Amino acid sequence: MISFPFGKGKKDDQAQKKPWGNENPYRVFGVTEDAPYEEVEAAYKELCAENEGNDKYLIKLEMMKEAIFDDRLKARMSGALKSKVKDSPFEAKLIVKKEPWWTKVSWLKNLVKMPEKKYAIQVSALMGVFILAGIAAPQLASTTMGFGFLSGMGFLYNRGTPEIRRDDAGNPGEMRPANYGALGKTVVLCMLGGGLGFMLANVLMANVALPAFFVGDAIVTTMFNLGIWFTALFFQVQDV
């Protein structure tokens, strides 16, 4: 009688009778102890086809196959068996595949969306007014920046949501519930857009010779509102 592989001898087989009896799974399947997964699986399917209708024996065959796989797994864990393939199915329980790092930030691509023509005109028109006002009246830089920030937040937060229904008198119907997740994204994105514009303004003032009429406050408010304009134009925070 062929001994059970990887340290299980005849004495062990006699001491603990297997559910399928004293048959050796490797002999029944006609495979060697180092047979690859595909060969074991093919032998199992062939035996199942030969014994179709004999449900009791089919159950035994399945238990034998699982015993071979468990035996190979234990041998692999102990180092007695070296896999012949890179990702052996015998050690599937041991392998923990890590997801690529970029899958963890894949949600970022859902924030970027090209604007529709009507939306682009609305955003550009209003933000253009704030930019021109900041250039024409640099002393109102903080005011134009504040209005630009709030307007950009309004555009970004509401982008993609359906219009509020109104009755015949023009009064708004049921209001939409607040989306605090989208609101948080709106605040963060607008702060990043405005902050990048502010930093770029300082870089320009420190390294580029600009026209005399383009004073510091005008440069800051222009670049700040450009950052807000870009953010409101190309991002969407609502999941619709």
Image (spheres, grey):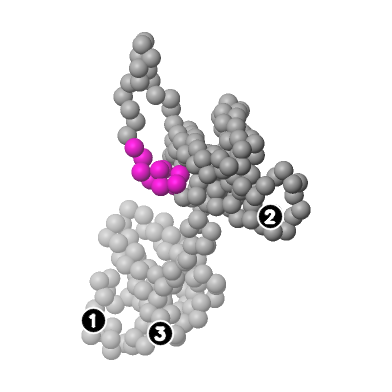
Q: Earlier in the sequence, mark 1 or mark 3?
A: 1
| Category of crowding for the residue at label 1, using alpha-carbon neighbours closer than 10 angstroms: few (below 14), some (14–19), many (at least 20) | few
* Residue found 39% across the figure and 59% down from its top: 48
Secondary structure predominantly adopted by residues drawn in magenta: helix
**Dot 2 lies on which element?**
helix
Residue at label 3? Answer: 78
Q: Which of marks 1 and 3 is in front?
A: 3
Q: Using the numbered discs, state the Cα–Cα distance from disc 1 to disc 3 in whole angstroms.
A: 22 Å
Q: Which of marks 1 and 2 is nearer the N terminus?
A: 1
Taking depth in this image into account, of 63 and 222 the one nearest to the observer is 222
**Dot 3 lies on which element?**
helix
Q: Give the range drawn in magenta.
A: 178-187
Q: Residue 62: x, y in percent?
A: 34, 64
| Category of crowding for the residue at label 2, using alpha-carbon neighbours closer than 10 angstroms: few (below 14), some (14–19), many (at least 20) | some
Q: Residue 41 carries which label?
A: none
Residue at label 2? Answer: 205
